[in-house]
Image: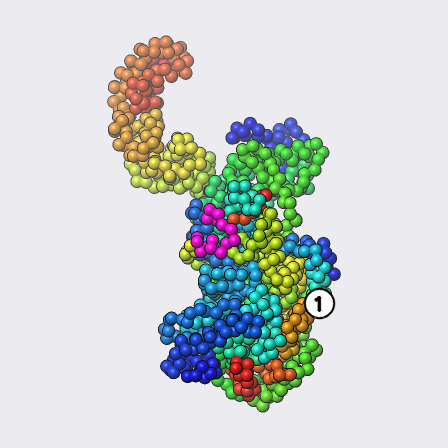
Amino acid sequence: MRDGEPQDLDAGAAADGRAEAFEAVIGLEIHVQLATATKMFCGCELSFGEPPNTRTCAVCLGLPGSLPVANARAIHFGLMIGLALGSELAPRSIFHRKNYFYPDQAKNYQISQYDEPLCRGGSLEEIRIHRVHLEEDAAKLIHVGSSGRIHGSDASIVDFNRGGTPLAEIVTEPDIRTPEQAGEWLKLLRSTLRRLGVSDVNMEEGSLRCDANISLRRAGTEELGVKTELKNMNSFRFIERGIRAEVERQRKILSEGGEVTQETLHFDPASGALTSLRSKEEAHDYRYFPDPDLLPVAIDREMIDLAREAMPELPAERAARLQRELELSPESAQRLAFASELGDYFEAALDAAVDPPPPAQMLANWLTGDLVARLGDGEDPQASRVRPAALAELVGLVAARRVSVGAGRQVLDSLVAEGGEPQAIVDAEGLAAMDGAEELAVIVADAVRANADAAERVREGNSKAIGPIVGHVMRETKGRADGTEVSRLIHEQLGV
Amino acid sequence: MIGRDEVLHVALLARLAVGEEELEPMARELSAVLDHIAKMGELDLSDVPPTSHVVELTGALRPDEPRPSLPRETVLAQAPAVSDGGFLVPSPQA
Amino acid sequence: MSATDVLALSARAAADAIEAGSLAPRELFDAYRERAAADVSAGEDGLNCFTWVAPEPPTDDAPAPLAGVPLAVKDLFCTAGIPSQAGSRILAGYLPPYTASAVSRLTEAGATLMAKTNQDEFAMGSSNENSAFGAVRNPWDRERVPGGSSGGSAAAVAAGLAPWALGTDTGGSVRQPAALCGIVGLKPTYGAVSRYGMIAFASSLDQAGPLTRDVADAALMLRHMVGRDPCDATSLEFPEAIELPSAERLDGIRLGVPQELTGEGIEAGVLDSFGATLALAQELGAEIQPVHLPHAPHALSAYYVLAPAECSSNLARYDGVRYGYRAPDPKDLLDMYTRTRHDGFGAEVKRRIMLGTYALSAGYYDAYYGRAQRVRTKIAEDFRTAFAAVDFIVTPTAPTVAFRLGEKTAEPLAMYLNDYCTVPMSLAGIPAISIPGGLSEGLPVGFQMAGPAFSENRLLDAAHALEGAIGFDGAATRA
Ligand SMILES: [Mg+2]
Ligand SMILES: [Zn+2]
């Protein structure tokens, strides 16, 4: 319950034995908007908040006579995703039409892949991949309610800017067991995709969207229960909370001897409520058939080689390398590799020519600890005022004891707030570590005198009592004194 | 023979209103055509692959290069109902 | 040149005359535009060929291969800022923002867009009676149909209201009306001409084709239409330039007569004319031999699954949201969809949408769509086998001569049988041409010749040789 939401119930209840032993079986379907320049089947540029219907053409509006032509880079990106997930790549790519009427579909069918997806199988860490296929995104519907009434009914406005944006749909096998695992895995998937450069993977902006299929089974059995589909969750927090709420709902039904109905649900993060999206119309019959406007595309050796050449180092490989080459702790290596924005920042800082150079592990600690804490989790440090070279310089100064840890943190505060150069800040604020041992010894002696009670307790063997004396020194030196040196001097002067 | 319920089901899938007086003729005409088509059933096609396209496999892809979009006034000019730069429709949520 | 002399020129002869300076483009354009406009103003008394006629003559006389030759274009093609309604109420008044590639290629070669022609709604029909803009009449007999779905294009060319016209052929929609109106109609190899901007009926079958007075004109128009278009993923580069035909003999040419398409169901007068044309071909040096297309009798069934299936999806976009007709006062979204489509589409279009939706729906896909695709495989194979033994396959184009208006409207199946001889070639994607073979009961009979994919040059040459020997005269209808 990392986000401390009071209404959240622990899905892992079975594990601590307080309820009947059910196991959650969770599969994810992730829609990833690909970061191509143009749409899936036309030359319109992708839209980033432009005014409605300004990024549209005959093709993505489904005008009479228009024809789709598939975007080569979207297929290239699809192949890269397949390679990253260790999928089997299809020898040919076939697009089908998925037929259903809805105002967000310009043609009233979606061009998608059906029985021959671009990629099949594979895995990312412990979760197996079922398939990856390409399709076009729907347009955006803006519900204007009764204010836009058309002859007595509520109205919506359709904006086709998003319509036709290339999507990769990644479907996992139902290998996930807990909401936390779903969240963690999705973060790894996101950093993998970001690392590939195939998507902006921004959940809040909708470039990464996730549905979850959830069912419960009695622990130790293999038979799958009736599953429900949780639609369109758009933040990591909501995904974990939504899944947790649905697991708990199903557990309650099953514990009371009821049956779960197959349905599609929406999780409202504000109220924590799950509502059914049951359609009042007929059961879907999508009438898939191969799109006769698009010939099957042969996925030849050349295309696969191009995708392979474009593959960057993936997070798991990066973690291994950071551990091997820089002797980072496994935790630091994973943290940097799986959050690729941190990894990129880290490596940029390490590459910066600063003197003295920062030790790698210490740099990692300052980045993932001090800097991230100041910026907030999930913020990209590249977007902050602290340049990688500045952090490297600061950590180098601290490591060389030219700046104490405490003073270093003050410098970092200043960098986060206003940017700038660490050495310049150190000089301007007088934060350089004190190098004259005699000068420091005098201040320590003053501090010992001023804190006689504490000094007495330290002499008696209470080492924790040193605090007020150290604090006094730090106040006097404005944090420039080296903590270890101060402690050594206090002990020396007190003869313990 | 296709019955009226089936006609209504298919008509809903196709989003076509069918008047009461249109039901019976529609069922009859569709049945006549389907009966004719059913003769294909005589053929043994078990080992025959399906043909979606007679054209040989090509790799007709498009380079990921932007082309100009249409001006919005052109896009909306033919629309039956427009509001706030978009196409106005009865809400699917209603 | 007198107006009569101008109208007597084939498109090719007119282009030559313009190039030679003996005919002004404006003179040619005015001669036809006047006739076309007169047909429109004649209303019920006219042929009802056109849905739009250019109000102004062209201003650009830049030299180009087709400079100044007026062109009539089937309304199925989108033309920027000019009504493009596909014969449908649902697109009444629709003004597209762009022009179809096939049309642009012709106008870039100098042809001038003079008129849009009437057609069966969304190209679904064989009589041009399924048009929201009224039936078209056959200039040979005004009480008869011109064939369809490119009926307006065929009638306009036959009646001398346009020197030539662009049509589309899905299951015979260029060839059959050409046959019924006594002109030449060519369906090219699938993929030879871009479909971009051609309002789709059945995407895997639709192909643009010329309707012309003679074979040389068909070759000339085709020359300026073919080629790969980056906007159509199914278009292909034509492997060679289209030549103007010159052959006068058929020595050594083997013509295959498929018994499956030349027997039962073909009218006696049509078979007589077909036999006479075969005899002429033999005199020109051709060898006639029987061939088998064992699956051809199932072609119509496969076609009436595949084409409606594709159409049911292609026509889903006509929903009253972005363009075209919307039913008034919808009470909700479903009501808007269903009434818009009920009122906007004609009976035949709705029938085919229903048929196609049914054939693709859960539980029926394999029995209908899947099976039809397999029949299609067999039909293409049949042709490949046959072309190992013969150069061309020849059949009557249509089983009957032009029938009376209203004669077949009550029975859809009877109407569908019109396509019996043309549909197999459509399913196989191969080129086929219909030329006038003669008259039966005073009405034209079409002679169809089909060749392997991309054999257009040879096919046009053979058709040209035969055309010369037949010496068909359609001038009476142009009076
Ligand atoms: Mg999808
Ligand atoms: Zn577009």
In this figure, which colouring scheme has been used for the structure?
Answer: rainbow
Q: Residue at x 70, y 32 (%)?
A: A256
Q: Taking A443 as reference, is C442 left or right?
A: right
Magenta region includes residue B21: no
Q: Residue at x 66, y 58 (%)?
A: C358
Q: Position of residue C421 (x, y in %)?
A: 63, 75
Residue A404 versus residue C445 in the image, above or below: above
- Taking depth in this image into account, of B87 and A495 the one nearest to the observer is B87
- Taking depth in this image into account, of A477 and C318 the one nearest to the observer is C318
The residue tagged 1 is B36
Is residue B2 visible to us here? yes
Q: Position of residue A327 (x, y in %)?
A: 41, 37
Magenta region includes residue B77: yes
The answer to whether mark 1 is within 8 Å of ligand 1 is no
- Taking depth in this image into account, of A397 and B5 the one nearest to the observer is B5
Q: Chain of mark 1?
A: B
Residue A339 versus residue C80 in the image, above or below: above
* Residue type (three-letter) at the residue carrying disc 1: His
- Taking depth in this image into account, of C274 and A404 the one nearest to the observer is C274
Q: Residue at x 57, y 30 (%)?
A: A8
Q: Residue at x 59, y 53 (%)?
A: C337
Looking at the rendered image, the quarter that the N terminus of chain C falls into is bottom left
Q: Taking A297 as reference, is A276 left or right?
A: right
Give the total number of marks visible in the rendering: 1
Q: Position of residue A46 (x, y in %)?
A: 44, 50
User: Magenta part of the protein: which range?
Assistant: B72-86
Say what secondary structure mark 1 lies in. helix
